[in-house]
Image: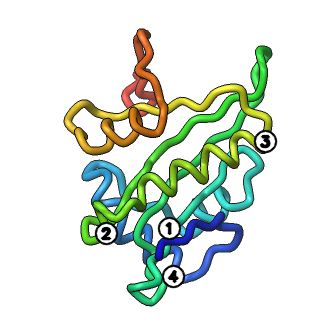
């Protein structure tokens, strides 16, 4: 059985889970530090979710970050950094994380929830469409502040 919970306090188990999970999501970004995790867990604008697998002694097998922010046209939400441990893929962990995040966003009064996913992540893209996300006809731009002169 998979359970989803919002992280409100950071301990060694949470830190260790991110050390294990983040490299499965990104080869170019290090796992968050204890201080960064604490900032996320205590922020009113981010919700840090973890998935635990009861069949693996409640091991954390996935995470998702939900950003909540108010703009002039209403409350919005954005899902970021969804990762499911390689050993737990195909068990519905991603679906449960996303559905929990959608419920949390709805409770916060968000009008929409956005996310992005690389086309190469075929299983994830199928999941998002199956949940009800619709592909938008828009351009996504990024300005990398690390490369400014």
Quote the CA–CA distance across marks 1 and 3: 21 Å
Question: Pointers 3 and 4 in contact (CB under 8 A)?
Answer: no
Which tag, 1 or 3, sits closer to the chain's start?
Answer: 1
Asked if 133 appears above or below 17 in the picture, the reply is above
Q: Position of residue 5 (x, y in %)?
A: 62, 67
Give the SS element for disc 3.
loop
Asked if 71 appears above or below 123 in the picture, the reply is above
Q: Identify the mark at residue 51; answer none if there is no mark.
A: 1
Which tag, 3 or 4, sits closer to the chain's start?
Answer: 4
Which tag, 2 or 3, sits closer to the chain's start?
Answer: 2
Which residue bears the numbered disc 2?
A: 88
Which residue bears the numbered disc 3?
A: 108
Which residue bears the numbered disc 4?
A: 13
Question: Pointers 4 and 2 in contact (CB under 8 A)?
Answer: no
Quote the CA–CA distance across marks 2 and 3: 29 Å
Q: Position of residue 32 (x, y in %)?
A: 48, 61
> Is residue 145 rendered to the left or right of residue 69?
left
Question: Pointers 2 and 1 in contact (CB under 8 A)?
Answer: yes
């Amino acid at each position: 059985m998979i359970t989803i919970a919002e992280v409100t306090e950071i301990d060694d188990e949470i830190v260790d889970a991110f050390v294990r999970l983040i490299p499965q999501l990104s080869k170019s970004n290090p796992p968050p530090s204890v201080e960064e995790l604490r900032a996320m867990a205590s922020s009113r604008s981010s919700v840090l979710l973890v998935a635990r697998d009861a069949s693996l002694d409640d091991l954390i097998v996935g995470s998702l970050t939900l950003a909540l922010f108010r703009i002039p046209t209403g409350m919005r939400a954005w899902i970021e950094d969804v990762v499911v441990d390689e050993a737990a893929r195909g068990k519905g962990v991603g679906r449960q994380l996303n559905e929990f995040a959608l419920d949390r966003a709805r409770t916060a009064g968000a009008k929409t929830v956005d996310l992005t996913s690389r086309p190469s992540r075929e299983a994830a893209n199928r999941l998002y469409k199956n949940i009800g996300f619709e592909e938008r006809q828009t351009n996504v731009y990024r300005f990398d502040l690390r490369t400014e002169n």
